[in-house]
Amino acid sequence: MKNKLCAGEDNIPMKIAKDVVCGLPAIFCEFFNNCASKGIPARWKQAVITPLYKNGDRNKVTQYRPISNLDSLGKIYEKIILQRINDLGEMDGIYQHGFKEKRSTVTAMLEVQDFISSNLDAGKIVGTYSLDLSAAFDLLRPDQFLNQMRNSIPLNLLQTLMDFLSGCQFTVQLGKTRSAVRDLKVGCVQGSILGPHLFTLYMSNLPNILTDVHLISFADDSYISVAHKDINTVKSRLSEVMVVHDRYLSSIGMATNVSKTELIMFARKPIMDPVRICVNGTDITAKPVMKILGVLFDQNLGWTSHIEKVKQKARYVLLKMRYLRRYLDAAEMKKVITSHFFGLIYYASPVWLTEIMNSRIWSILNVLHYKALRIVCADFKRRKSRRELDATVERARPYEWMRFINVKTAVQLTLMGANGPPITKKLRDNLYQNDRTGRISFMDTSRLKIGRNSLQNRICCASEFTNEWLKGISDNRLRVELKKSFIKNCDI
C-alpha cells in the first residue's frame, strides 16, 4: 500500500497508520480478529465522496469524477482480507488480467493480439466485440455474490466478505456542504481496496457461460473473439454469443447497452461488404478500427490508426514541453520528457511496436523522437545532427527500443512459468536452446508476415541465458542484465 498523506474521516494518513500497525502488531492483530468475528465497524463502510470536475458542462453530473477517501485502518483490514482471498488461488480465472500481480493491460492486449494474428496467419477471419457496461462496480448484488461463492470460499471468509458488502453508505461533500447519508443496497464502497477484486470474483463464471470463444478481460472490460474461415459462420457465432452474454449480464444485475457494443472483423484482405449483426433487435455494424485498452487495433493489425492518434497527442505535449524548457535544465527536462512524452508514445509498445510495421510509421516515430531530443538540448534552430542529439541525450532510438522491449517482455513472461498468463505457456513451448552455444531462442512458427505480430514470432534469439536463468531470476536483475546486453546478444 502506498504511503499517501490523504486521510478519511479518521484523519489518519496511510503513512502514519502503517507505522502504528507495524509498531503494535499484537494489539492490532487482536483488533482485526475482533473485526472478523464481531463485524466491520460501520464507519469503514461509509464513503465520503468529493466530485472532481473533469471537463465540459459543469452542470452535468457526468462531467465529474467521484473521489472517495476511506479510513486508513479500514483499508489495511481490507488488504489483509484480500491476502486471504489470494491465498485461495486464482479464483477469478486466467482470462482476467485486472488487479493481479504481474498482469496488466499489456498482457491482456498481448493475449488478444496473439489470438488474432495466429488465426489470420492460418487463413481465418476473426471477429472481436466488447459489450458496453455501465457503472459495473456499483451494481454488484450481494445475494448473487453469496450464491456464486458459496462453494468456493471458506464460510468464515465468505461471512466477512458479506459483512463488507452489507450496510454500505455514502455521502457527497462539496466544499463545506455535505449531503444526507444514503444506503448502498448494491455495489461496493467507492474507493475500497476489496471492491474491484470482489467484482472480478463476481464475473468469474463468465468463461462457463461463453464457451468455444477466446475471452480476455481487464476489470470490467471484456473482449470476446471468434475465428473461422467462413465469414458467415463468424457472424452467426458472434450473434449467438452476444445474446447469451447480454442475457447473463442482465441476470446478475449488470446494466448493458447493446447499441454501444463495439465490433471489428479482422482479415488479411479487406472485407468489402459492411458486416452487420443483429442482437435483440439492435443492429451492430463492424468498425474498421476498435480501441482495446487504449490501443487502436485496425482490421489488418497495421497499427497506422494508433500511430496517427499518438502523433496528434504527442504534438500537443511537445508544445507544452517547449514552453516548459525555459524553466528547466537539460537533466530535468530529460526526466520530464521520459515520463510524460515517451511514456505517451510508447504506451503498450510490446503490443504494436514490431519490425514489420510499414516505413511511414517508423518515420513518424523517428520524427517525434528527435523533436523531443531537440527540446531537451534546446536546439530549436535545428543546428545539431541526429547523431549529435543521440550522443548528448543518450536515449534509445525507436528501433533500439523495439528490440529491447520485445525481448524484455518475452523473457519476463517466459520466466513466470505456471504463474503467468496463457501466452506464457505458448512462449515456453516455442523455446529451445542451442546445444553448441547455449543460446536461448524462440521458434518463429508463422507462415505469413502478419503472423509475426505474435510476440514469440518476432524474436529469433532472446539472449545468452543458460538454464539457470529459466529456473528463476528477480525482475530487477533481469531488467539490469537485459539493458546491459540486449544489443550485443539479441539477433532480431
Image: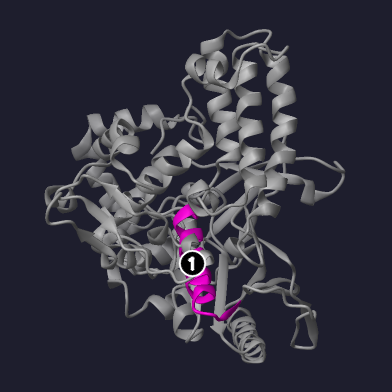
Relative to residue 58, is residue 293 drawn left or right? Answer: left
Within 10 Å of disc 1 (Cα), the crowding (few <14, some 14-19, many 20+) is many
- Is 62 situated above or below 375? below
The quadrant in which residue 96 appears is bottom left
Which residue is depicted at the point 60% across and 12% down?
A: 377
- Where's residue 169, x and y in %? 58, 54
Relative to residue 288, is residue 75 drawn left or right? Answer: left
Q: Is residue 35 visible?
A: no
Q: Amino acid at mark 1?
A: Gly
- Where's residue 117, x and y in %? 51, 68
Q: Is residue 390 magenta?
A: no
The front one of 87 and 14 is 87
Which residue is depicted at the point 49% across and 57% down?
A: 195
- Element on which disc 1 rests: helix
Relative to residue 418, is residue 360 drawn left or right? Answer: right
How many discs appear? 1
Outermost residue, front direction? 436
Which residue is depicted at the point 12% across and 53% down?
A: 436
Magenta region, main secondary structure: helix
Q: Which residue is mark 1?
A: 451
Q: How is the image coloured?
A: one colour
Which stretch did the figure color magenta?
105-126
- Where's residue 491, x and y in %? 34, 46
- Is 26 situated above or below 78? above
The front one of 157 and 125 is 125
